[in-house]
Image: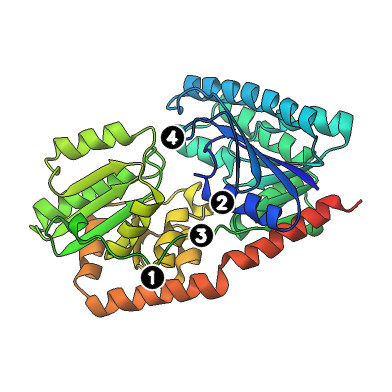
C-alpha cells in the first residue's frame, strides 16, 4: 500500500514513534511518505531518508495560549494540505495515517476519503481534550470544540491505534469502536545505541548524576524537578548531586530563568535539544532518570517516551505516580504519589543513597521493556491495524 503519515507537533526523524512506525511500514513492503513541520533543526522542505519520502512545511511557533494554538494549527493545516496535494499528484496514497495532537488533521484527510476512497488510520498519541484542559486548566468553548474535533476524527477513521490501553479504552468508548478496528501500538525505543561509553565529565565532579529527557512545556512538570533540585541542594544540604535536563520546548527559557533565580546554575545543566549521540552517552552516564509529569487526568493516560528510554539503558526512575507511568515502569521505578517538589527531591535522594536498590530497579525496568513492552510486539500490532484497514 501507499501510505501517507501526517504528524503536526514534531518533525521526523526527531519524533521517534512516528519514525519507527514509518520504518516498520517500509520494512513490511509499503511505500511510505511523511508530512511534518519544519522545526527542531529539521528545516529541509523535502528529502528522502532511508527510503522514506519526507515533506516538511512551515509552522508558526509552538503555542503558549489559545491564540497561539489557533495560529499554530491554522498554519499546520494549510501546510499539511498542500503537502498532501503534492504527494497525491506525485503518486497518490491508499492510506492516510493521522498522528495527533491535534485532532484537526481529519480536515486534511476528509477530501481524500470522500472523493478518492482513501482509508484513514487515526494514531492517538494523546487524548487531546484532556491535554487541552491540563494546559489551560478549564473547560470553555474551545474545550468543547476540541471534543468535537476528536469525535469527527474518530467518525472518519477506518481503524484507530493508541499508545496504551488507557487511551484505547477512552477512544473506544467515545467513538463506539469495534474491537477489530482498535489496536494498541506501544512506543518503545528500538534504534538507540545502549552500548556507548559513559561521559563522566557530565557529572561536573559530583558523585551523582540525575537526568531528564523530554519536552519542556507547561504540562511536563519540569519546574517540579528544578524545585526538587533546589530542595536537595538548599534544604537537604547536598552538594554531591548534579542534574542534567535535556530537551527543549515552549517553557525552556522560563525554566532557565527559574534555575538562575534559584541560583542553581552550577547544579543544573540545561543544554536544550541534544544529538542522539549525546543523548545515548548521557543516558549511560546518569544514575537515575526522572519523569516529573504531574499526576492529572491527562498524564494518567500517557505513556512517556522518557520512561521507556531510561528503561532501555537500565536506569532506575523516580516519577510521579501516573496510572500509565506505573504500568510502563512496573518494578523499575520509585513512585511519588503527590505533585510535590520536596517529596520528589526526597525520593531522588532516597534512591541515590541506596546503591543496591538503584541496580535492582534498573535491571527490573530493562527486563520489563525487553520482555513485555518491546517494539517487535508493537510492530505486529501496527501491521495488524493496516491489514484491518485494508479489509472491506
Q: Distance between the residues labelled 3 and 1?
A: 15 Å
Determine which residue is flagged by label 1: 314
Q: Distance between the residues labelled 2 and 4?
A: 18 Å
* Front-lying residue, 290 or 14: 14
**Res. 47 image quadrant:** top right
First in residue order: circle 3 vs circle 1: 3
First in residue order: circle 2 vs circle 1: 2
Check contact, mark 2 vs mark 4: CB within 8 A. Answer: no
386 to 131, vertically: above or below = below
Label 3 Cα neighbours within 10 Å, binned few <14 / some 14-19 / many ≥20: few
Determine which residue is flagged by label 3: 191
Provide the secondary structure element on which disc 1 rests.
Answer: loop
First in residue order: circle 2 vs circle 4: 2
Residue placed at 41% from the left, 60% from the top?
Answer: 321
* Front-lying residue, 50 or 301: 50
Label 1 Cα neighbours within 10 Å, binned few <14 / some 14-19 / many ≥20: many
Residue 49 in the image: x percent, y percent?
A: 59, 44
Determine which residue is flagged by label 4: 41
Relative to residue 140, is residue 213 drawn left or right? left
Relative to residue 300, is residue 257 drawn left or right? left
Q: Distance between the residues labelled 2 and 1?
A: 20 Å
Determine which residue is flagged by label 2: 17
First in residue order: circle 4 vs circle 1: 4
Amino acid at each position: 500500500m501507499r501510505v501517507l503519515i501526517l504528524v503536526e507537533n514534531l518533525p521526523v526523524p526527531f519524533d521517534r514513534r512516528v519514525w519507527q512506525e514509518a520504518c516498520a511500514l517500509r520494512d513490511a513492503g509499503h511505500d511510505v511518505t511523511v508530512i511534518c513541520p519544519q522545526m527542531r533543526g529539521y528545516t529541509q522542505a523535502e528529502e528522502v531518508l532511508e527510503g522514506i519520502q519526507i515533506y516538511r512545511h512551515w509552522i508558526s511557533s509552538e503555542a503558549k495560549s489559545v491564540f497561539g494554538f489557533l495560529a499554530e494549527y491554522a498554519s499546520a493545516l494549510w501546510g499539511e494540505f498542500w503537502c498532501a496535494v503534492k504527494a497525491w499528484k506525485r503518486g497518490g496514497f491508499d492510506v492516510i495515517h493521522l498522528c495527533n495532537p491535534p485532532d484537526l488533521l481529519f480536515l486534511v484527510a476528509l477530501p481524500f476519503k470522500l472523493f478518492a476512497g482513501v482509508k484513514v488510520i487515526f494514531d492517538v498519541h494523546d487524548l487531546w481534550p484532556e491535554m487541552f484542559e491540563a494546559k489551560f486548566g478549564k473547560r470553555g468553548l474551545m474545550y468543547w470544540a476540541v471534543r468535537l474535533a476528536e469525535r469527527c476524527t474518530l467518525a472518519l477513521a477506518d481503524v484507530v491505534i493508541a499508545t496504551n490501553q488507557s487511551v484505547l479504552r477512552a477512544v473506544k468508548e467515545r467513538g463506539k469502536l469495534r474491537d477489530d478496528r482498535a489496536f494498541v501500538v506501544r512506543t518503545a525505543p528500538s534504534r538507540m545505541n545502549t552500548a556507548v561509553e559513559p561521559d563522566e565529565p557530565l557529572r561536573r565532579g559530583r558523585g551523582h548524576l540525575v537526568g531528564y529527557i523530554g519536552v519542556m512545556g507547561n504540562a511536563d512538570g519540569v519546574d517540579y524537578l528544578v524545585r526538587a533540585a533546589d530542595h536537595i541542594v538548599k534544604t537537604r544540604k547536598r552538594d554531591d548531586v548534579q542534574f542534567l535536563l535535556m530537551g527543549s520546548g515552549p517553557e525552556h527559557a522560563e525554566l532557565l530563568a527559574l534555575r538562575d533565580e534559584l541560583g542553581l546554575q552550577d547544579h543544573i545543566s540545561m543544554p536544550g535539544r541534544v544529538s542522539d549521540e549525546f543523548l545515548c552517552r548521557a543516558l549511560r552516564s546518569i544514575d537515575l532518570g526522572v519523569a516529573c509529569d504531574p499526576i492529572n487526568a491527562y498524564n494518567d493516560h500517557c505513556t512517556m517516551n522518557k520512561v521507556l528510554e531510561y528503561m532501555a539503558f537500565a536506569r532506575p526512575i523516580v516519577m510521579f505516580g501516573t496510572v500509565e507511568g506505573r504500568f510502563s515502569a512496573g518494578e523499575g521505578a520509585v513512585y511519588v504519589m503527590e505533585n510535590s517538589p520536596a517529596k520528589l527531591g526526597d525520593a531522588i535522594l532516597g534512591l541515590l543513597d541506596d546503591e543496591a536498590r538503584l541496580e535492582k530497579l534498573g535491571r527490573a525496568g530493562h527486563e520489563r521493556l525487553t520482555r513485555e513492552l518491546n517494539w517487535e510486539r508493537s510492530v505486529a500490532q501496527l501491521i495488524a491495524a493496516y491489514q484491518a484497514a485494508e479489509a472491506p
